[in-house]
Amino acid sequence: MPAPTVPLADALASGPLVLDGGLSNQLAAQGCDLSDALWSARLLADGPEQIERAHAAYVRAGARVLITASYQATFEGFAARGIGRAKAAELLRSSVGLARGAGEGGEGGGPPPPWVAASVGPYGAMLADGSEYRGRYGLSVAELARFHRPRVEALAEAAPDVLALETVPDVDEAEALLRAVEGCGVPVWLSYSVSGERTRAGQPLREAFALAAGNDQVLAVGVNCCEPADAYGAVRLAAEVTGKPVVVYPNSGERWDARERAWRGSPTFGPERVAAWRQAGARLIGGCCRVGPQDIARLARALEP
């Protein structure tokens, strides 16, 4: 499918856009086994049609921006499965093509092609031990930048509309990611995973967001994979500190019980929150873990003019 003819940055100037929801929960709803250390990235090799089907479900729900299945896709992770660098780079690039293919191209009265955000998850996602929610891996900024640069280059070769530097747990990794994307020719958004008014690693959000201020490659800054209740304050602060459009896509509000390996509690994500996020500066609005196509459809209706 063709890419949109309008750059994402220009589209954001015209009003908010709907992001998709959690890719993993939609894949699970389709019957996919995500127990592998590669998580949803395993399906880039073993079930690409399932990924495209999941993306298409969000397009039908009203999503205008799709996030690729490359969050946990790394050269190191693929190598542990016996996949060489050339094939791994091909799989990374394919994640962008699968998202492109989920659009309908605007033909026959269908929706226009979605923008594609190539996901660049944190270093901890590769470790598959939950450390992406803590940060502070014991690596320097330079070491983290060297880790991220090859996958950034592979994803950039597939010409996504934006790179989603997402679920970033601390300022050091954010700095590393911004170094890693320099000169890649693709705009980025920077999205932290937060708890209250701090990053998951404990730094003040004002400090974290300030890292993106004045960086012209960053078209939006914000938060994802957080409690819905934490989103409003973060959106307001991101807009204040950076003057940039804000991206926000929190979780459903349910909590993961690691011992029982089950979700607990009730969802608190809902379209009633959208107006406040939008008023505070949000221009890319969607959902993360446990937010599905039905939730995105309700969100899309809430954002209709």
Image (spheres, rainbow, N blue to C red):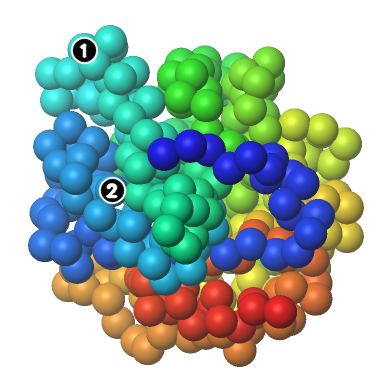
Viewer-proximal residue, 84 or 266? 84
Q: Residue type at mark 1?
A: Gly
Q: On the rendered image, what quadrant is the C terminus found in?
A: bottom right
Give the labeled residue for mark 2. 52
Identify the residue at the far front of this view. 108
Q: Which label sits on residue 84?
A: 1
Q: Are marks 1 and 2 in contact (CB under 8 Å)?
A: no
Q: Residue type at mark 2?
A: Glu
- The residue lying at 68 percent from left, 43 percent from top is 6
What's the CA distance linking mark 1 and mark 2? 24 Å
Q: On the rendered image, what quadrant is the N terminus found in?
A: top left
Residue 108 can be seen in this image: yes
Q: Which label sits on residue 33?
A: none
Picture coordinates of residue 302 (x, y %)? 61, 83
- The residue lying at 61 percent from left, 50 percent from top is 191
Tell me: residue 77, above or below residue 280.
above
The quarter holding residue 36 reads: top left
Element carrying mark 2: helix
Q: Specify whether 260 is left or right of 247.
A: left
- Label 1 environment density (alpha carbons within 10 Å; few <14, some 14–19, many ≥20): few
Q: Specify whether 272 is left or right of 149.
A: right
Picture coordinates of residue 175 (x, y %)? 67, 31
Q: Nearer the viewer, mark 1 or mark 2?
A: 2
